[in-house]
Amino acid sequence: DAGITQSPRYKITETGRQVTLMCHQTWSHSYMFWYRQDLGHGLRLIYYSAAADITDKGEVPDGYVVSRSKTENFPLTLESATRSQTSVYFCASSESGTSNYEQYFGPGTRLTVT
Amino acid sequence: GQQVMQIPQYQHVQEGEDFTTYCNSSTTLSNIQWYKQRPGGHPVFLIQLVKSGEVKKQKRLTFQFGEAKKNSSLHITATQTTDVGTYFCAGQLAGGTSYGKLTFGQGTILTVHP
């Protein structure tokens, strides 16, 4: 059972480049989330999705785009990377229809924008 | 918007000492979850509290949810080196449709000196 995977695990890109971070889950969870983690800020929600083709902004969505054409995939795109987007990015998923919204996190992608 | 504040940001303890981290929300929560992130790892779910005044224990860990459902704490008795990591609280807003969305505290980084 692969669970939830992210790729790449590490990425270095230049300012202004477009970069896409991939997230894939094998549980058929309806809900998926993208967070960024920066020291002193904890985990901040970028975008989330309640189902395929349903997405909404989180706390820090500017500069990011998401799509969810299939339940199992939730890619995050930085349209024109900036140094302030250097961070560790976590994807997470959770079940729908239950009272327990425990989130399962992927291993993370460490992104450096130079 | 909803804010979840967590203190302290850092805590250094000697092995065997106790440790407590506190979490406060600006709004009433439906439930609160706690996650642990080992150094270099991803957040892993520990527990969820739902009821006002609820107390749950997991071995040396004690979790409390405040009567007003706006604050929570995690207490570790007799810390061990395996307890090192960052502990996050995460609250789900009461009422409305939140799609399982959580607001994370900034986290407490725990260091245990042997």
Image: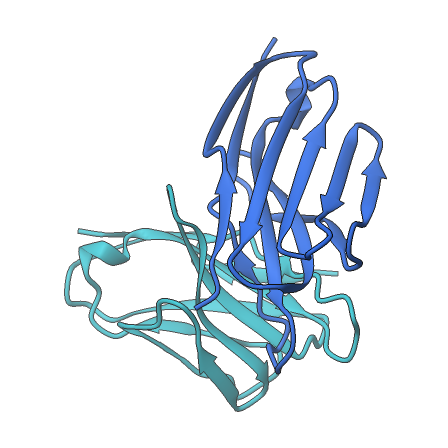
Question: In the picture shown, does residue B45 fall above or below B80?
Answer: below
Q: In this view, does B45 lie to the left or right of A15?
A: right
**Residue pictured at 15% horizontal, 67% vertical:** A16
Residue A44 point in image, percent of width and height: 43, 59
Quarter of the image where one finds residue A64: bottom left
Question: In the picture shown, does residue B26 fall above or below A59?
Answer: above
In terms of depth relative to the viewer, which is nearer, A54 or B68?
Answer: B68
Residue A10 point in image, percent of width and height: 38, 50
Q: Count every numbered label the image shows and give the total.
A: 0
Residue B46 point in image, percent of width and height: 72, 46
**Residue pictured at 69% horizontal, 19% vertical:** B79
User: Does residue B113 appear in the picture of this structure?
Assistant: yes
> According to the rendering, which colour does chain B have?
blue
Quarter placement of the N terminus of chain B: bottom left
Colouring rule applied to residues: by chain
In terms of depth relative to the viewer, which is nearer, B22 or A65?
Answer: B22
Residue A111 point in image, percent of width and height: 33, 53
Question: What chain is colored cyan?
Answer: A
In terms of depth relative to the viewer, which is nearer, A15 or B32?
Answer: B32
User: Does residue A111 appear in the picture of this structure?
Assistant: no
Question: In the picture shown, does residue B8 fall above or below B65?
Answer: above
